[in-house]
Image (cartoon, helix red, strand yellow):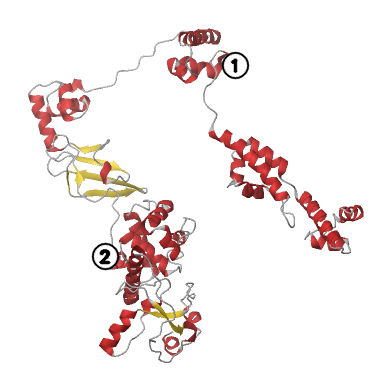
Amino acid sequence: MLDALKYGNSNIYNIIAFPKSITSQPRYLRYCRQCVEHDVNKYGEAYWRRVHQLPRVRVCPVHYISTVESGVQHSGLHMEYISVPKTVRSSDELYDENTTAQIANLAIDALWLLQNGSTLGYLEHTAALYDRWLRFKRLRSSGGKTNRKKLAQDLVNYYGKEFLELFGAYNSGACSWLRRIIQNSCSFQNPMFHTLLMRLLAGSVADFFAGISGEAPVYQPYGEPPYPCQNALCEYYLQDVIASAEITKVKGIYRAKFECKHCGFAYRRKGPLPKEKQYEGQIHVADYGWLWHDKLENMLLEQASLRKIGMALKCDTRKVVRIGIKLGFFPQEQTPKQRTYLAHPKAEISFDEKREHYRKRWLNAVASNPGVTRIDLRIIDSKANQWLRQNDVEWYEKNTPPSKSRLPKWVDDDYENAEKIRKAMGQIRYYPGKPKRISILALGNAAGIPKIHRILASGRAPQTQAAIDDCAETLEQWQHRKIHWAIAQMLGRGEVITIQKVRHRATIQDKERKLDRFIAECIETGK
């Protein structure tokens, strides 16, 4: 490989088993005027810079001005020395101040990669860094699923649509190249796309690759420490005084234990939780701590009521009793227990009696609340409503006010889509030129209805389905239309009409010649 690089072997890509670059190179070599002036003043001559030749990088990362094209073509480069010319083939490509600054930042990243690329390791290292940065930015879950929609939206918000289009990195808002990078980072992609993503995640390519030296951020499922204390008795209540947490992972789910050194209070959390949401909500207490126990013992010595102790310590009275028994404040017999269940025999009620009972209750509810909706009646007597709907639905429908709820939105959409389908059928049928098949997909595209197959499969579009059934044509109907069209074309041009010519003009594949009789009949009638 080294010999091939030294002596210009064109078979270099086969030797190293690496694909050729898929990026489009500029046609002419480029240079920066101020860089040339600096080189001449310092060295007496100027030299070409690699960063000026990179695709789409039209700004010098040193002087923040647009580069210019020389008259030297890439295709004419050989092994001989070519000096930087003094003539300019094209003038500067002017950008606005914001765009120039953004391109200059990417040029700085590209220059850093050119100077440090040999120390960055293989693409597998880059894939590992992508994983850590995406998790750190909360764009990838603990299970490894990436929120591609939010990532693409963040990219557009960071650079802007016009800037991404300048680099060919904007595809109808989807930025499809993102999926290829984050799903298979080890495959070869446009290096500029990697640069765009790295700057979005880390601020610069140099900061992104700080992970090679062990400085890349570590994903924190509970945010950056310190964490708040949840003990209401502690003087640091809801203040960030817990320096670290004991974080484990059980069956793919994060679990954490937080312990305050000022009061001994410890609590647990299950699942990742942002830092801003840790100051409220329920927690699982692992240990109340020495401060809490001292407060409980003092209140028990003062013979405070159980209710007062529970309110002061933010706990249940049963917890107070259990600990009080251990400390000797209460007798062992006072252990809180559930009352035993005593089964009481119930008199059997027949179905007819139940039905009559609930019917009377429902009629009383309807008569006592005139003008109310069904939903209100369900709240007024939910028991009667539930029983009648399950066991006496016909009587229930006759004796219940009609529903006043509006029809769902998809009903209006269904009628509107059906009308669009019928109009689209005429557009396709009378489209000039060779007849196009009036298929379901063609009708959906002409009518402007995306994903029409999914709409029909939902079962919520009966009108649209009826319109499709009326308008869509079978393969045989389409072939007949093409045959009529082909014969009309040949008659208009005064050509000799044969079955073979008609089949060829209509582009019909009919190996079994099932349509020959139909073609012959059409030729005889001249239609």
Q: Residue furthest right?
A: 524
**In the picture, residue 299 is in which quadrant?**
top left
Identify the residue at image location x=30%, y=18%.
Answer: 339
Residue 118 visible in the picture: yes
Q: Nearer the viewer, residue 104 or 467?
A: 104
Q: Is residue 389 left or right of residue 42?
A: right
Q: Is residue 327 left or right of residue 140?
A: left
Residue 218, percent from left and from top:
28, 57
Position of residue 362 relative to residue 491, above or below, is above
**Other-residue count near label 1 (Cα within 10 Å), few / some / many at <14 / 14–19 / ≥20:** few
Q: Is residue 269 left or right of residue 12?
A: left
Q: Nearer the viewer, mark 2 or mark 1?
A: 1
Identify the residue at image location x=67%, y=43%.
Answer: 423
Disc on res. 214: 2
**In the picture, residue 408 is in which quadrant?**
top right
Q: Earlier in the sequence, mark 2 or mark 1?
A: 2
Q: Nearer the viewer, residue 180 or 44?
A: 44
Identify the residue at image location x=49%, y=76%.
Answer: 20
| Residue position marked by numbered label 1 in the rendering | 394
Cα–Cα gap, marks 2 and 1 = 72 Å
**Quarter of the image with the N terminus in it:** bottom left
**Other-residue count near label 2 (Cα within 10 Å), few / some / many at <14 / 14–19 / ≥20:** few
Residue 119 visible in the picture: no
The amino acid type, in three-letter code, at marker 1 is Glu
Residue 154, percent from left and from top:
38, 54
Q: Is residue 513 left or right of residue 64?
A: right
Q: Residue furthest bottom?
A: 80
Residue 143, percent from left and from top:
39, 51
Helix or strand or loop: what does disc 2 sit on?
A: loop
